[in-house]
Amino acid sequence: MGMVHTEITLKNVYDIGFAQGGYIKPEEIRTETVTAVADTGSMYLVITEELRQKLGLGKKEERTASIANGQRVISYLTDAVEVHWKNRFTIVHPLVIPGAQKILFGAIPMEAMDLMVNPVSQEVVGVHGERQECYALVS
């Protein structure tokens, strides 16, 4: 299977709260639409340092990340973003890996939005069609 790309929109969660509280205008929410690699081998949403700065995201916590070549690098999680794909969204803390050049749309945000990579059509699709399903174990 080749590399699958998809368009996602990222919004600064703090800005969304400030807009809801009337402290900033909705059009002031820092938002970026990007083309990401749908990477089921990555757990996180991985963003570049440049994108972190454009979105105004603070650094939260240092992590050690294992990258595709087996190397382990010091990385960090950022403030939360709202991730939008078509009619779906979720909130995650992106991972910034030093030197990263591509945005990786990993397994956790895709799973949260009930998405998968279709190996035949080579595109991101809803696991259950157009409607996002949510799962909760209730006793």
Image: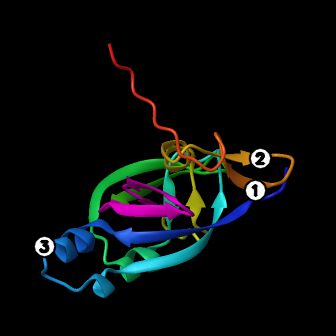
Neighbour class for label 2 at 10 Å: few (<14), some, many (≥20)? some
Q: Residue at x 38, y 50 (%)?
A: 63
Q: Residue at x 39, y 21 (%)?
A: 137
Query: Is the Cβ of the residue at disc 1 closer than 8 Å to that at disc 2?
Result: yes
Residue 21, numbered label: 3
Q: Main secondary structure of the magenta part?
A: strand
Tell me residue 50's x, y (percent). 46, 80
Q: Amino acid at mark 3?
A: Gly
- Tell me which label, 1 or 2, sits earlier in the chain: 2
Q: Residue at x 47, y 78 (%)?
A: 32
Q: Residue at x 66, y 50 (%)?
A: 68
Q: Quadrant of residue 83?
A: bottom left
- State left or right for residue 66 relative to residue 94: right
- Front disc: 3 or 1: 3
Tell me residue 132's x, y (percent). 53, 45
- State left or right for residue 116 relative to residue 78: right
- Front disc: 2 or 3: 3
Mark 1 lies on residue? 123
Instruction: Identify the element where label 2 is drawn.
Output: strand
The colouring scheme, among rainbow, by chain, secondary structure or one colour, is rainbow
Instruction: Identify the element where label 1 is drawn.
Output: strand
Instruction: Identify the element where label 3 is drawn.
Output: loop
Residue 123's place in the image compared with 115, above or below, is below
Q: Which residues are magenta?
A: 78-95
Q: Amino acid at mark 2?
A: Asn
What is the C-alpha distance between the residues marked 2 and 3?
40 Å
Mark 2 lies on residue? 118
